[in-house]
Image (cartoon, rainbow, N blue to C red):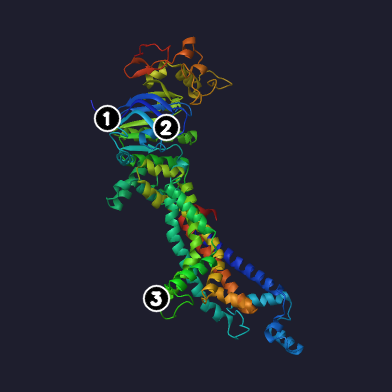
Amino acid sequence: MSAPVLQLDKVCIRYPGAPADAVRGVSFDLRRGETLGLVGESGSGKSTLAAATMGLLPAGTAVQGAIRFEGRALFSEITDQQLRRLRGRRIGTISQDPFTALNPVMRIGTQLDALLHWTHDRPKKDRMARIETMLERVGLSDPKVRMAQYPHQMSGGILQRISIAAAMLAEPTLLIADEPTTALDATTEAQILGIMAEAKATLDGATLFITHDMSVVERLCDRIAVLYAGELVETGTVREVLDAPQHPYTRALLDCDPARITEPTRRLPTIEGTVPPIHKRPDGCIFAPRCPAAIARCHAEAPERHELGPRRSAACHLASPTPVTP
Amino acid sequence: MMSYLVRRLVLGLLVLVVAMLLLFVLIYAVPGDPATIALGPRASEAQKAFFREQMGLDQPLAVQAASFLWNLLQGDFGTDILSQRPVADLVFSALPRTVTLAVAGVVWAALLGVPLGIWAALRPGTFIDWVIGLISTSVVALPAFLMAIYALILFSVTLGWFPAIGAGDPGDLADQLHHLVLPAFAIGVAWVGYIARLVRVSMLETLAQPHVRTYRAFGVPDLRIALRYVLPIAVVPVISVLGVGIGNLLSGAVLVEVVFSRPGLGSLAYDAVISRNFPVLLGAVVVTTALYVAANFIADTLIAWLDPRLAEKG
């Protein structure tokens, strides 16, 4: 079997000058054809992991453990220079805010062409035709007109389609989408998710989908990795995790998802308390202070990663292997 | 885009008219009777009255201002009191020399200041950034006329590399360029620092914008990002500051032209002030104001071309 597209092995990341790690001991792998939903609240380390995978962490950030792209470790087997060459060719990205992701003073066509700088040995006519075809594929009805326009002349939905087109033009092996629908309204979000689903189906590779929205994960992803305060608390297939969540944090996240609430209610449920700041982590389990199921052991001893099945684990003392319902 | 430029042009012309009226009132308020100055202290009252009538000085202020503006619009800048030559001739023969000086000063300052600013912005907080910052701050404080005097003493008097006086033989381009070097140097020095600092701050600000990250996420090399995509955005505020700063530059040109005895609008205005030659002074100042308005219009046009959003907002 070929190496996973992306493999993280006990990755710890510390920003320069920070008192503690922003990401601690995260391991997971992402194989060809899979879509992994990376889920967690703000500050859980999702975007840090994405930036690390692209080699776009601020200068001086310490990364421990190994991040492997197609079996080769970043920063050691792949140099910064080689990683730069992978970005935009083998690793494509879609950013969170379509309104600020594009250069405000460049026409869309010129701009996409500038991003695809490595294709510049081909004739300009061919490059532009390729861009036009891709814009059409992401659902723009008049790609020629759009290519001559500037970003401020367009809506968020159109801009995010253009961003998706930019990422897809690279024909990446690894597509990283960092909350691509957060800045959009609900109707547009549904359209963009539809386009994302189509786009990733045409990829010969894998997708890392960062989100805080469980219903998005359910709709687009095969696997899920739940992050809490920089640690991986649970991972498995979407079905396994959503049907039988083993970590209380995953359960709490699911309880808070408005799409899963069936009983009429006056108040949306929330998780009590806040994510602890990185330098004030509790001694035991990081989730224990907010955990409704915490026992004495949880406050004293950090739980190991419990292997619950193939590529299925939860970091909780109370986790128990449950048979997956067929 | 076009409507934006038309609006800017109309605004510029309006500024010009208001500035000319203000100038006229200012000069009117200057103490001293033009008739006495023109005819000398021994002229009789009758001679003075005839002079005033001839020059229109007996008319009400509003009428004088209106005829002043009207004459200007027709290209009639009045007559030099001393030489009796038309002021327009004097002013328009001096104009190209001053424009050449100002443009040469800004161009060499930008050619040096912009790369220095970029260099500092790409290495913020390093020794190079510190050195460029130190040099910029030091030269910004130097007045152009002081640089002119130092340059004159060192390069003309002591070393004899460059001529000290004049603008060169009108038919000899090389000679004119040779005469241009020191004055342009003196005018531009402070601007090197000024431009370097502006470019540095503006580059850093633009580099922090989210869309720059998109280029990096697509593996565009850093230097290419800085020069091709960040710089065109970063120079926009620099250009608008430079457009306004042209006024500063022109007033610097006055003194530099005087130091180098270089015929131009500056020395023309200076001589006119000394001899109370109001029509010439007015002509020189009106043309300088027009230069200023023109420089701002050019800056606005460049900005609209670089940032299409601004043109739409107006």
Q: Quadrant of residue A1?
A: top left
Is the residue under label 1 in contact with that under label 2 (CB below 8 Å)? no
Percent position of residue B242, x then y: 52, 60
Against B164, residue B187 (above or below) is: above
In-image side of B254 versus A96 (left or right): right
Percent position of residue B193, x then y: 49, 57
Instruction: Name the chain letter of the residue that bears numbered label 2.
Output: A
* Residue B98 vs residue A35, the one in the foreground: B98
Q: Residue furthest right?
A: B45
Query: Which mark is drawn over residue A48?
Result: 2
Tally the marks.
3
What amino acid type should be assigned to the residue bearing mark 1? Gly
Disc 2, SS: helix
What amino acid type should be assigned to the residue bearing mark 2? Thr
Q: Residues within 10 Å of mark 3 (few under 14, many from 20)?
A: few
Q: Earlier in the sequence, mark 2 or mark 1?
A: 2
Is the residue under label 2 in contact with that under label 3 (CB below 8 Å)? no
Q: Residues within 10 Å of mark 1 (few under 14, many from 20)?
A: some
Q: Between marks 2 and 1, how big is the CA–CA gap?
A: 21 Å
Is the residue under label 1 in contact with that under label 3 (CB below 8 Å)? no
Name the residue beneath numbered marker 1. Answer: A71
**Residue placed at 41% from the left, 12% from the top?**
A319
Disc 3, SS: helix
What amino acid type should be assigned to the residue bearing mark 3? Ala
Against B239, residue A88 (above or below) is: above
Q: Would residue B260 be seen by someone viewing this image from the given angle?
A: yes
Question: Quarter holding the C terminus of chain A?
Answer: top left
Q: Would residue A222 be seen by someone viewing this image from the given angle?
A: no
Disc 1, SS: loop
Pointer 3 and pointer 1 on the same chain: no
Instruction: Name the chain letter of the residue that bears numbered label 1.
Output: A
